[in-house]
Image (cartoon, coloured by chain):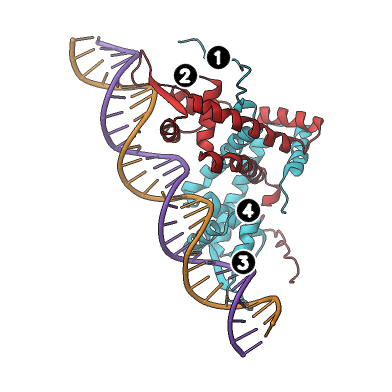
Chain colours: A red, B cyan, C purple, D orange
Amino acid sequence: MPAKRQPVPATAEHAPLQLEHFLPYRLSILSNTISQTIADDYQRRYDISVTEWRVMAVLARFDGLSAREVAERTAMDKVAVSRALARLVTAGRVSRAIHDNDKRRSVLGLTEAGWAMHDEVAPMARAREREVLAKLDAEERAWLERILDKLQPTKP
Amino acid sequence: MPAKRQPVPATAEHAPLQLEHFLPYRLSILSNTISQTIADDYQRRYDISVTEWRVMAVLARFDGLSAREVAERTAMDKVAVSRALARLVTAGRVSRAIHDNDKRRSVLGLTEAGWAMHDEVAPMARAREREVLAKLDAEERAWLERILDKLQPTKP
DNA sequence: TGCAAATGGTTTCATATGAAACTATAACGT
DNA sequence: ACGTTATAGTTTCATATGAAACCATTTGCA
């Protein structure tokens, strides 16, 4: 086996990024890994995507939202929400009615089947979150909470 | 304006996820926001994608890698790397030679033009990282470092 | 040797995604 | 009332993406 490759020494001219210590990169890897682990739990079993699951999660908490409100709460764009809803309605997991006073708006909610699925997936998702957080002690968890609050982008 | 919509009370049957307190979701939003902010700095100006930039960043630090090694270091899959390299080589930012003792392997590196671009983009990326970290105090930054180390997935 | 299995890398194909255009309805200003 | 502008949601189109098939070369081993 060849010797392990060494970093090029940072010369005067070049100052390469060290990705493994670069916050945006580390967050991206961590986030993708965690989300994918959870998604693996339900994607095959229920034939549902991450975006669709997020829509369902929001509707589980806030019944009767419009599509735009779902987009706001999930931080997804309206096209993605529109498509997710189309699939969810076809699959019978979400109900869609028209708003009484505004015929443009949808009034969305989980169906019986939607709730049934939600009630199976939500505990799995929570369990995965616990697995991740179990790597930290109580103090670290508290700091993480605090740090995320401070970094969290707020709407303009 | 209508009254702010209230969460459906968590009944005995249903225990909806609270996305705004759900770690995987929060990480995903945070990560996407930060990465996109940085990408906005260079995508238009240099006509380059996030994946391409990551490949360049790795080659800036480790000269002479093969495509597979780039894939490992960037945590991207080999198809993505192959495509990114194709564009980068065409654009004259990355050089590709064939390995002396293994004709399957590429030997990759930044060209002059690649280095020139790198030397403009890297400082911008670092500046953005500093902007994000400026929201935290020194103690919080230290904890974040530690927490990321512990959560960071290690190869199996 | 010589041949099966493994490896590096690219191409194909099917799906995901976002920006912009579009349709329908509602709100606003005169 | 009526035309303009804004909003909710969908469709279109062009691009991004990943899994699997693929090609070329190398490795392992009988």
Q: Residue placed at 64% from the left, 34% from the top?
A: A125
Circles 2 and 1, Cβ within 8 Å, touching? The answer is: no
**Which residue is at 55% across, 14% downward?**
B6
Residue bearing mark 4: B75
Task: Depth check: give the residue in front, D3 or A74.
Answer: A74
Q: Position of residue B60 (x, y in %)?
A: 63, 59
Q: Are marks 3 and 1 in contact (CB under 8 Å)?
A: no
The chain holding disc 4 is: B
Q: Nearer the viewer, residue B58 or B70?
A: B70
Chain of the residue that carries numbered disc 3 in the rendered image: B
x and y percentages locating residue A26 in the rendered image: 67, 45
Residue A64 is labelled as 2
Looking at the image, tell me whether mark 4 or mark 3 is earlier in sequence order: 3
State which quadrant residue B72 falls in: bottom right
* Residue A42 seen in this snapshot: yes
Q: Tell me which amino acid carries mark 2.
A: Gly
